[in-house]
Structures are given as C-alpha cells and as structure tokens.
Amino acid sequence: MGIIIKNGVIIDGTGSPQYKSELLIENEEIEEIGTNLASKGNTIIDASNKIIAPGFIDMHSHADLTILQINRAEPSIMQGVTTLVVGMCGLGLAPANDKVRKYYANFVTNMFGSTTLQLYDTIQDYKEILEEKGISPNLAFFIPHGNVRASVLGMEDRSATNEELEIMKTVIRREMEAGAFGLSTGLIYSPGIITPTEEIIELAKIVSEYNGIYDSHMRNEGTGVIDTGMTELIEIAQKAKIQAQISHWKAAGNTAWDLTSEMIKLVEKARSEGLNIQADIYPYEASSTSLSGLLLKPWVYVNFKENLTNSEVRKRIVNEILNTLSSNYIRNIPKGISKSELIDGIISYLGRNTNIISVLHNKHIQGLKLDKVLKSLYPNENTLDALLDFIRDEEGSIMVSMKMMSERKSIRSLFKQDFVSIGSDGLIPVEGNTHPRSYGTFPRILGRYVREKKIVSLEEAIRKMTSLPASILHLEDRGVIKPGFKADLVIFDPDIIIDKATYKNGCQYPDGINYVIVNGRITVERGNHIGTLNGQILKHK
C-alpha cells in the first residue's frame, strides 16, 4: 500500500517555482507526480494550503552522541529534518580504542555534559547497533579527526611521527571504505587545537582519494576568522585537492562583524579558482559550546581537579585563557593596557554575553548569565578565580550559549550566499535544557527569514535545506522531489511555520510542521511523532 498526497503545493528543492500537483509514494520512493492519481488502496494525505518539500538535510548535527538513547530524534524530525550529518567538529563516539577511551571520552563527556557516552571501535560497529535498534532519521557519518588522532597520540601536544601518521591514514581508509562521507575537524577543541595544519593536509589527502569531504570547525571564527580560520581551510583544500565545508560559518564577536564582506569575497575567490568550497550556517545570534572546552587546553584534563586547584598551575591556565580569548575576540589591544585590565575586560565581556544552558550540579543557575552566576556562587573571589572554581566544581560539564553574532550585520549576508546550506549544530538532549537551534533551526529560517524578513524566497530557502546539501554530500537520490528519488518529505503550513524554542526553554517544538515522511513511511502525522523508526544509515559513494 502506498501514500498519495493531494491538494498540496510542491516546492521540489531545486529552486524552481512552486506548482500544484499530487504525489504517489510506493515503498521507499516517489513513484509518480501528476493529477488525479488513483487512490484505491492507498493512504491519502490532504495537503490543502500546505507546502510539500523534500525532507530537510541538517548539514551539521551532534545527534550521534545521544541518538542511541533518543532514537526517535524528535527535536530534529519534528522540525522537518529527515537526514542528519553527524560526527561533526572532530567529535564522535567512534572510532575508538583504549587511548581514546582513557584520554578522550572524558573530554567529550565534559564537553557535552553527559556521563553516559559509550564509545565504539569503528563507525561500522556503531552503525550496526543503531540499525538493530532503529532510528527515525537518516544518518550520514563523518570521521571525527579528534578520535583518529587520540587513538594514536592520546592528548600528546606534538606533531605525529611518520609512523603515527600512517596509522591514522589506515584508520581513515577503513572508515571511508565503510561509507563515511569525509573527515571533520574541531580546531578549537582538543586534540584539534594542538594538531598542525600539515598533519591535517596529509589525512585529508586520503579522504580525497575516496572523493570525500573535509569539514571543519575552523581554528578561529572571531577576529582571526580570515587570517587564521578560512586561510587554513583553503590551504588544506588546495594542497589535499579536496572538497571543503565550513562548519557553522560565522563572524564571532562584535569586532569581527565588519569582516563579513571580506569572508564572502574570500570564498568566492577560492571558488572562482576552482576550489569546491561551501558552508553551512544556523540562524541564531548566540553560539553554544562547552565552557571548559572553549577555555581549557588538553593537558588540563589529565588531572582536572588538581590542575584547577593548584595556584601555580592556575597561573599557566590563566595565561592560556587570555591568549585564547584575545586571539579570538580582540583585534587591536589598546596601548598602555595592563595584563590584569585586559583579563578583566575579556572576562567581563564573556560574563555579560554568556548564558548557562546546563550544568552538572547547580541546576538552579541554568538560564542565568555567567557574570551573575559567578558573583552568586563565589561572592568573595575575583572574577577569574571564580570562573576557574566554577569550571572545576561543575567537573567541566557546563554548556553555555554566547551571544557573539549579529543577524543584521553578518548572519543575513552569509545566509544569502548561494553556496550556504543549513546546519543546526544541535544536540538531542537526554535531559535538561539545550540551545534553541536543536529544536528550531529550520522552522526559524522559513518563518523568520522567509515569511517575516523576506531575505530569500521560499523556493531558495528550501533549496538550501534540500538539494544543496544533497549535492554537497553527493546524495544522488535525495533532496529533490522527483520520480525515483527517496520519499523523504515534509509537509508544512507556510503561513504559520515558526520556531518556538528559546534560550531559557530550548526544548520546544515548532509550529507548522504537519507531516514528515522518511523513506516512504509517515513519521510525523498531523504534528505528532507516531514512533516510526524508518531511518537509514547512508553510505558515501
């Protein structure tokens, strides 16, 4: 028995004008597009006054960290996402060995505030467990560079030897041959932050042999976004002869916003010279990350509590925090300013613009600004000591949102570029709060950027969510409404679709999503997830 969708308006994902027609779905595929399709024996969906679009493809998700526990993936599915790209920012549950489990699993646990992460020897091992349990969305896996490096060097702060590099290449070959789509790096996190560019180039060359993709959370997204971040990514793309994707493209910090036009020109120049470079973006002014992951270097985690308690060791940590924040968010340090004044200024700025999303222990502070939290919990300490005590006492598990971007001065311009797709950078939370992007990214684009702001047309927004990411990933049978293509579809009301998730309560489903179909089976019906687990693990070809 198939499904017929009647009375709807089709936006096919290519950017072409919308049109009214009917759809017949049989098995996993779109069988026919036309009028007066025979309905006998088929399930009928009435899409009157609704848009029928390809299922949205989330180009940047961290759902792989928890989807085994939350396999219905409601935060994603309920906003129309049918495919999640995972293994991002160099982080993931596989591949792993004893070194990764010893040195890296603790870091990932601290990064994302979860104590239940299970690591797997290979991505294939993890895929098989997911397939056995069943999942609602499709998953496309990237190889997390952090796992690969940590499996050989642990958290050692040095360049890999030739022998160690060959071992890493072997791991990457194995995972690419098993269907991974490419290699992801997180160059502000451990161990990406201590990895030389030349080492990444050599690993990317292996990915290139399989026509894979290099995806990067760049080394700098603030004042050094061009000189340190994008320039390095372009160099890797050039020398490794590889397709490259900029993760969650942004100008972070008010001193970086006026670099936006230069950022766009740099990508356009690289593309005009033959490089295959794209980017993804999310429509929020606040980013989200682990406070400890942002501020601390890998060595701190070896003896975490002791290092954050010892007064002499703390001096080294302070210097590193100062260097990290000043290189990312201060373009020109005023003459005559003292080190203590610079520290106070940076920490003050951080405190005013950072909200606590979740913590391990002091749950009552969730939703509050960092500066108020520090004053409340540590009233007799200076700001920097209070910050280090806070990180120590919460065992590093502090997820924050940081208001660093500007919609008017930067995000809109980046979003409008024709090579920019959409990625939520979201998590599927097991408990507690999360950044609103996990629940609202795609409806926010359609409601705010299309209907309210009219930044792009509805057809162009859908293209950015469907055929563009499908083409980036080389998915030849998804992302477009066309006979023979997989029946990943979303039906929504363009007049009411909008995100409802907020920074204080990020776990709210959007309005306006009526149906979601994954591989030919209804997963969301009349706005409710009905428990269908028909997602597939996609393989790069």
Image (spheres, rainbow, N blue to C red):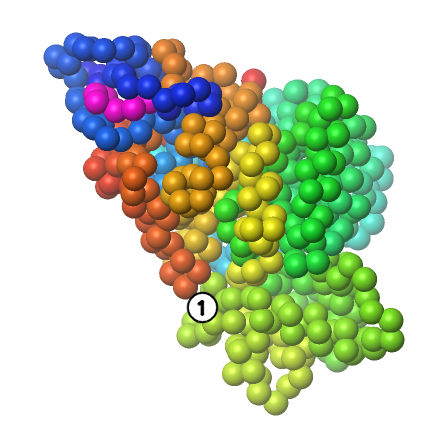
Marker count (numbered): 1
Counting from the top left corner in percent of width and height, residue 344 is at 71, 76
Quick one: SS at disc 1?
A: loop
- Region rendered in magenta: 5-10
Q: Which residue is mark 1?
A: 367
Residue positioned 62% across, 63% down in the render:
292
User: Furthest-left residue in view?
Assistant: 40
The quarter of the rendered structure image containing the N terminus is: top left
Q: Where is residue 273 shown, x and y percent of the image?
A: 77, 23
The extreme bottom residue here reads: 380
Q: Image height check: is 330 above or below 523?
A: below
- Position of 337 with respect to 382 (left or right) is right
Q: Nearer the viewer, residue 354 or 174?
A: 354
Whole-percent x, y for residue 425 in the image:
52, 45
* Residue at (79, 69) in percent of width and height: 319
Q: Quadrant of the C terminus?
A: top right
* Residue for point 22% across, 28% down: 47
Q: Check residue 97 for magenta coloring.
A: no
* Residue 22 visible to the viewer: yes
Query: For the residue carrying disc 1, how many other residues have a C-alpha within 10 Å: few (<14), some (14-19), or many (20+)?
Result: some
The image quadrant that residue 22 belongs to is top left
Three-letter residue code for mark 1: Gly
Is 350 on the left or on the right of 475, as rendered?
right
Principal SS element in the magenta part? strand
